[in-house]
Image (cartoon, rainbow, N blue to C red):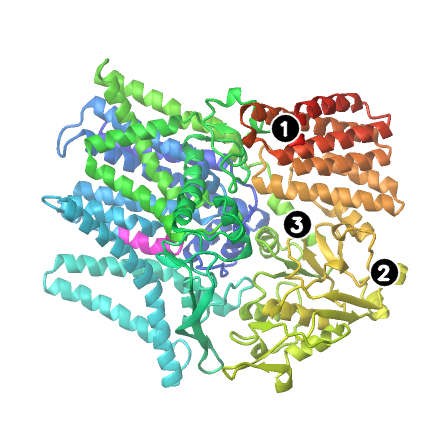
Amino acid sequence: MHYNKINNLLGWLCFAVASTTYILTLEPSVSFWDCGEFISCAFRLQVSHQPGYPLFAMIGKAFSLLSMGNNAKVPYFTNMASALASAATVMFLFWTITALAKKALVKRSAEMSRPNQLLIMGAGLVGALAFTFSDTFWYSAVETIVFAQAALCVSVVFWAILKWDAHANEPGADRYLVLIAYVMGLSIGIHLLNLLTIPALTLVYYFRRSNQTSTKGTLVALFTGIGLLALVQFGVIQYTVKLAAYFDLFFVNTLHMGFGSGVLVFLLVLMSVLLAGIIFSIRKNKPVLNLIFICLTFIYLGYGSFVMIPIRAHAGTNLNNSHPDNAFKLQSYLNREQYIAPPLVYGPYFDAQAIDQTEGATIYRKGKTQYEVVGKKQKLEYDHNTILPRIYSNEDRDAQFYKQWLQLGEGQAPTFKDNINFLFSWQLYQMYFRYFLWNFVGRYNDQDGQTSTKDLDGNWTSGWFDGGRHLPKFITQSNTYTPLYALPLIVGLIGMVYHFKGSKRDASVIALLYFFMGIAIVLYVNQPTVQPRERDYSYVGSFYAFAIWIGLGVLGVAQFMQQKVNARYAGMAATVLCLLAAPALMAVQEWGAHNRSTKTTPHDMAFNYLNSCAPNAILFTYGDNDTYSLWYCQEVEGIRPDVRLVNLSLFGTDWYIRQMKKSMNKSAPLPISMNDEQFKDGVRDYLSYQDAKIPDSVELKEIFDFITSENSDAKLQYQNGTTSNYLPTKNFKMSINAKQVVSTGTVPASQSNRIAQTMEWKYPANYVTKDHLALMDILVHNNWKRPVYFTNSAPDESIIGLRPYLYNEGFAYRLLPLKPDTSAQQLDKTNTMVMYNNVMNKFKWGNMKNATYLDQQSTALFYPFVATTFLTLSQNLTNEGRPDLATKALRKYDKVMPDIYPYIDVATRKFYIADTACHLQDFKLANKMLTSIDAYLKDQLDYNYHQLQKDADTVNLRDVQMGLTLLNEMAILGNRYKQLTVNPRIKQHLAHYQTKFSPLMRQ
């Protein structure tokens, strides 16, 4: 069969294998993190968070139509878009590897031998299928996330440059370069990852077009590629919009024309320049100039997907992040200006003190008839700086992590050595190479492991020496334990060595691709400290590059084998061996850790949050996972559209407060009394606390009126002549009208004796920001007409100190004006019967009991949260004299929740559940629970004792102390209740481990 036909057929075979794999393991509904927002924005073509992904949203919208009106199926089909894009990535990767293998084995225009054809196809299959089953790529392939389609763009442009390379001397070959330019432009509307291929593509162009290459020429080509990358990143993406904004400023403020008129003129000028350049290059017969103008035009054509952003922002969609409806707002949106950019070349150490402040560019906002000046960007100057700053953040959390990681003493000033140490030990090793090793060496589990290089959680393992390590069963028996025995890595390294020996130019291109899509991202992003989640998905492009070498490893193995057998048998043996060592092994090991087809935790947790709320409620959220999935449930499935979701992380922006003043779905506007002028950009952004020595608590309405007053007596005057409102006291109160509270259903009449006459609390911060201001406005003007709830992730500062008046009603805490209950811990306070009805009759549990796989958020975040919910409910039901309902609650927990231990603190929660079960005389459940806890603790303590004998520094002292304490508490419980048949075994284990760990406990 002809080479091209076989190549095409096997490429499509890789697509079929990958798409089948991903569809079989697809998440059936919404996933955690950004997926809920992306699905919502795709389904209703809304504006997602910065920098926005318009093409991604439009593709998602097209796939969502396959749901045929069944909105609950929308996420399945948007997830399928990722699956098919990922499968296409694998297909193009196959063709990329075969193109490189062909270059390595067959000289141009030479005839293809059968053994070489077999080797080339084997290399393509091994590399492409290894990438198919790699940990990070597979994870993104089964959910609605941008990285699947971003990887497709990477694979297409790299395949296209190799096609151009193979046909560069033929007429029309430059069409592949135009295709690359167009895909580059399109990819901007998906993710910027694809731009990082530009230096590698430039090197391919140089090697093909240069008659004689040199080190100097290679370096010039490399820096030209970096320049082109900067040109697209800053010139096309940022400065195009910036110039359009300043055109609009001139036309609106100077010529007094309407908003957007300057943008239209600028676009006409831009199109005219591009068209004139193309015509000029044709008339003057300048093919290179013609190619440049055509490629630039196609980049802009692809980039044109961003027109959707201001169009949909103007439409006033429910999700309208930053409301970028004008050129200046769009510029800020694209530049992600709400995020503080890290210093890259020169900047402060974390202990540096600000000594000066310099002004930058003017900040504009859209006014009623023209653009208004907000102020100027400010840049702080510091007294302790360094080149290549890595330990720069002076936030308390970050500074403490730097000190802990680098083992700096209190008051010890960091040095440049510490700075570089952090770069290599944390940013490069812990936050990149650890991820690389996950994919090609193996992994202990999928728990977060950012903070330690020694712990099992989140660490890499080859599996070769795990048999003698006495690993705990919760590791080895988990489907997220995926040792790969480093075989994919070994095959890849063989391929890399083979490639550099046989074709230094092509190998250098792959190395450059690997660097820019891995190490360069680490250097550019400059992550300060622990991230909200593991960031391996950011580096999938570098894993793609290494997969090319895994494929070429077949050639290296065959070359070695050819010393013993003929080329045909060597090729067959090398292909089979490498298929087993990489893709086959990876598929078997990784399947269980990526099969999401049976879990619905994100959907059902969001469902529970919404159904914790009374009708027409206001629910304040804070984090991604208690916001994005809820947005999905409302925007796509229409679940509880009466509940108004307010994300406190966004509530400090003027555009978001304006959105909250409008109706949304079936939710009425929030009771915000401020007019837009009182909280627009630059107005009341930050109000400081200045103690006015007021002796008593002050009504919240008086405080709110004072800090929103335009009266000069309510403002402080600063040395520069400016004035600003301020907070005069931290002692707040709200007088309560009991009749009003009962009439609105906030508190039932039967509990009216619990209503406080006055709610009093202390404001926790030394400043007031817009989110605090808007929350005060709502509390003052709501008059208890709408129920107010908070999720448990909201910090005290964001909820202005209201924690003493929050009562759990399931997954959300309701603000209730009740007399403070000093006998209960804050998080244990419940509106018990409402909570019982929600938990027992309304909530869903994500199929957690029977799911073949639960992700890290399900096990480490929501599983302990659910356990605590049932525990608190059952204890409070018992305390309120309802033991029968408490027993039902505990049995419900046992029915719907799996028996897992993501970390030892969960064992503590389960012990208290067992304790409550004993109190309720449910000894069957208590014995079951205690038997499970005992087995887990034994497993943990056995592992730590093995570590103690081997290396005492690797012992998790906290786990040992908690384990022994729990065993002791369980033994005491057993002495109290003779019906606990597990007690003799617990006592035996307690005595055994107390003896074993006695030397450690005496230290």
Left-right relation of 200 to 654: left
Q: Residue 173 placed where, x, y %?
A: 18, 47
Q: Is residue 420 above or below residue 329?
A: above
Which range of residues does the magenta coloring cover? 180-192
Residue at position x 46%, y 70% from top?
325
Left-right relation of 483 to 171: right
Residue at the disc numbered 2:
748
Real-space Cα distance between discs 2 and 3? 25 Å
SS assignment at label 2 = loop
Question: Which labelled disc corresponds to residue 607?
Answer: 3
**Residue 116 magenta:** no
Question: Which labelled disc corresponds to residue 940?
Answer: 1
Q: Residue 64 placed where, x, y %?
A: 50, 50
Res 98 → quadrant: top left
**Mark before the other along the chain sequence, 2 or 3:** 3
Query: Which mark is nearer the camera, 2 or 3?
Result: 2
Q: Is residue 79 above or below residue 904?
A: below
- Residue type, label 1: Gln
Left-right relation of 31 to 108: right
Residue at position x 45%, y 34% from top?
438
The residue most toward the top is 564
Res 947 → quadrant: top right
Residue 39 visible, this orientation: no
Residue 657 visible, this orientation: yes
**Residue 181 magenta:** yes
- Residue type, label 2: Pro
Q: Residue 903 placed where, x, y %?
A: 63, 36
Nearest the viewer among 920 and 768 is 768
Real-space Cα distance between discs 1 and 2? 48 Å
Locate the N terminus and report the quarter of the image it occupies.
top left
Left-right relation of 110 to 642: left
